[in-house]
Amino acid sequence: MTIVTVKETVAADADAVWNILSDFGGIKIGGPITDFHIEGDGVGAVRTITMGGGKVIERLETFDPTELTFSYVITNQDSSLPVTDYASIVKITSEGPAACSVEWTGTFEPRGVPEAQAQAIVNGIYTGGIQRARKALAG
């Protein structure tokens, strides 16, 4: 099992960052994402992200707004990402009124690429998601 963890500080209130990152239906079309839709609401919701000529289907597994944590899994083993048996958890921790840390951890098995390449792709997704939250809060 491969593990990727990204932990970064964000200069914003933890609840504000939570509101952005925990929005399971908040994926925007653009860049590598060519289509997106979500079915359901809350735990059990399923989102389908089309990118790279394939789909990534994710299901929300846990959602705790008190602890500022949520988790999700990829349900399709033929996803356009080079991983199988993927699970991820995001935890936001307040570090005062204008700062928080975001810890995003994923576990998976690399599929069709070297482990380092799969790790780099997953790391890029996590850092990109955190950067998206920073940009949304700066504007």
Image (tube, rainbow, N blue to C red):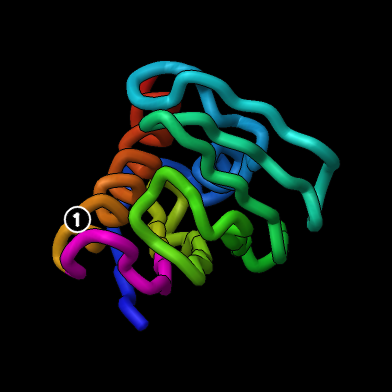
| Left or right of 125, for residue 58 | right
Residue 26 location (% of width, % of height): 60, 30
Give the residue number, with chain letter if any, for mark 1.
120
Question: Crowdedness of circle 1 by 10 Å Cα count: few (<14), some, many (20+)?
Answer: few
Q: Nearer the viewer, residue 72 or 68?
A: 72
Residue 5 location (% of width, % of height): 31, 68
Q: Quadrant of residue 40?
A: top right
Instruction: Based on the picture, tell me whether residue 110 belongs to the magenta stretch.
Output: yes
Q: How many marks?
A: 1
Mark 1 is on which residue type? Answer: Ala
Residue 16, placed above or below residue 101? above
| Left or right of 67, for residue 88 | left
Q: Nearer the viewer, residue 3 or 49?
A: 49
Q: Quadrant of residue 61?
A: bottom right
* Residue at image location 73% in from the left, 46% down from the top: 46
Q: Quadrant of the N terminus?
A: bottom left
Magenta span of residues? 105-115
Q: Nearer the viewer, residue 127 or 74?
A: 74
| Left or right of 83, for residue 70 | right
Q: Residue furthest bottom?
A: 1
* Residue at image location 31% in from the left, 39% down from the top: 128
* Residue at image location 52% in from the left, 68% down from the top: 87
Residue 4, placed above or below residue 100? below
Q: Quadrant of the C terminus?
A: top left
Question: Which element type, helix, strand or loop, lies under badge 1?
Answer: helix
| Left or right of 31, for residue 61 | right
Residue 70 location (% of width, % of height): 62, 61
Q: Residue furthest right?
A: 40
* Residue at image location 66% in from the left, 34% down from the top: 25
Instruction: Based on the picture, tell me whether residue 20 belongs to the magenta stretch.
Output: no
Residue 136 location (% of width, % of height): 43, 25
